[in-house]
Image (spheres, rainbow, N blue to C red):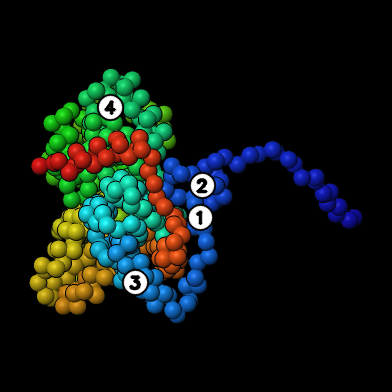
Amino acid sequence: MRDVTTAQPPVDLDVQPTPLALLLLGREADPRSERGVECPGDLPSPSDPDLVERARAAKEKLGDKVFVLGHHYQRDEVIQFADVTGDSFKLARDAAARPEAEYIVFCGVHFMAESADILTGDDQKVVLPDLAAGCSMADMATAEQVAECWDVLTEAGIAEQVVPVSYMNSSADIKAFTGKHGGTICTSSNAKRALDWAFEQGEKVLFLPDQHLGRNTAVRDMGMSLEDCVLYNPHKPNGGLTAEELRNAKMILWRGHCSVHGRFSIDSVDDVRERIPGVRVLVHPECKHEVVAAADEVGSTEYIIKALDAAPAGSKWAIGTELNLVRRLANAHPDKEIVFLDKTVCFCSTMNRIDLPHLVWTLESLAEGNLVNRIEVDRETEQFAKQALERMLALP
């Protein structure tokens, strides 16, 4: 007997992809998101041996009209062309201090360029070499989700007691929400000062979008307990919390995290201590609470750099932060043993989208009088975001 397979006609389920699905596939763009946008224009080949010289020539042609900012997590090939380096807020302030520069080329990610646009003059143009250089953490809190969270807090009867504190690593929309509701921005360097200020204004804090920085600052630096903190999950009804849990909490933490710092674990700490006797573990406060608790030292990117500069020759360090920076620090201090905390290499994938071809294309386009990839925050968003940033600047 012969097997006969009957071909079935294709079934048309009339399934329409959602906007989020299209965004994740890179087929649509969302100006309110940190991702899903393409870089227009023809980029030079990454194998072009003349890239360094082309970048140098274009930057020289632009002269004082351009000011290039390089975040600490950028590739060395990009950092070499930065006029200043630093963390996101330092770079935004550096840009504001250069009013004569017509173009601010921000080698970082989208939210950083937004902050620079908010703080710089109206006649200055902030440019991001690759519009797809976003931030997964910033994407974890959208304006719609945070507005819904505020409705949940209102229904629980506690919104008037809550002061929002948003990490610098957030979109302009979230900064504007924070400013509109009487809150402030913080960095990993001044998070405790920001929380001290917030608790003088109200009884509770809504901390956005990084749960780990909020939890670590509250528990490690301010003496709160883990029970004082609750985790608001925007993907669950009412954030996955009861009204009673919200009323009892001091810190309402948003369920967001950094994809780089979130990968470090207790196993990473135990393993490096076993492999390198006498090593000191130094981690960023975006790491998980158990990692921070097990570390010898905890601090911001700037703190990490200064700590290693001041460390004695022959000392051994395992650093829990982005690999580009760790490698650069190891090269800068050959008299010290400096290793990445995790065995698995981990760059910030979105930060690394800014590469030399994108930078060359950007600088050459500007040198030819073509404005590309401008980051521009609308007036209303800028107004309220600036209020939140100014409250941070006024912190004691």
Left or right: residue 373 compared with residue 56: right
The answer to whether marks 2 and 1 mark residues whose Cβ atoms lie closer than 8 Å is: yes
Q: Amino acid at mark 4?
A: Leu
Left or right: residue 249 compared with residue 172: left
Residue 115 visible from this viewpoint: no
Which label sits on residue 38? 1
The disc, 3 or 1, on the residue closer to the chain's N-terminal end is 1
Q: Which residue is mark 4?
A: 246
The answer to whether marks 2 and 3 mark residues whose Cβ atoms lie closer than 8 Å is: no
Residue 236 visible from this viewpoint: yes
Q: Amino acid at mark 2?
A: Ala
Q: Amino acid at mark 1?
A: Glu
Q: Which residue is mark 2?
A: 29
Say few, some or many: other residues with alpha carbon within 10 Å of mark 2 (under 14 / 14 to 19 / 20 or more): some
Disc 3 or disc 4, which is closer to the eye?
3
Mark-to-mark CA distance, 3 and 1: 27 Å
Disc 3 or disc 1, which is closer to the eye?
3
Which residue shows up at 31% across the image and 25% down it? 153
Task: Please identify the residue farthest to the bottom as the structure is shown.
Answer: 49
Front one among 242 and 205: 205
Residue 220 percent location from the top left of the image? 15, 45
Q: Which residue is mark 3?
A: 60
The quadrant holding residue 339 is: bottom left
The disc, 4 or 1, on the residue closer to the chain's N-terminal end is 1
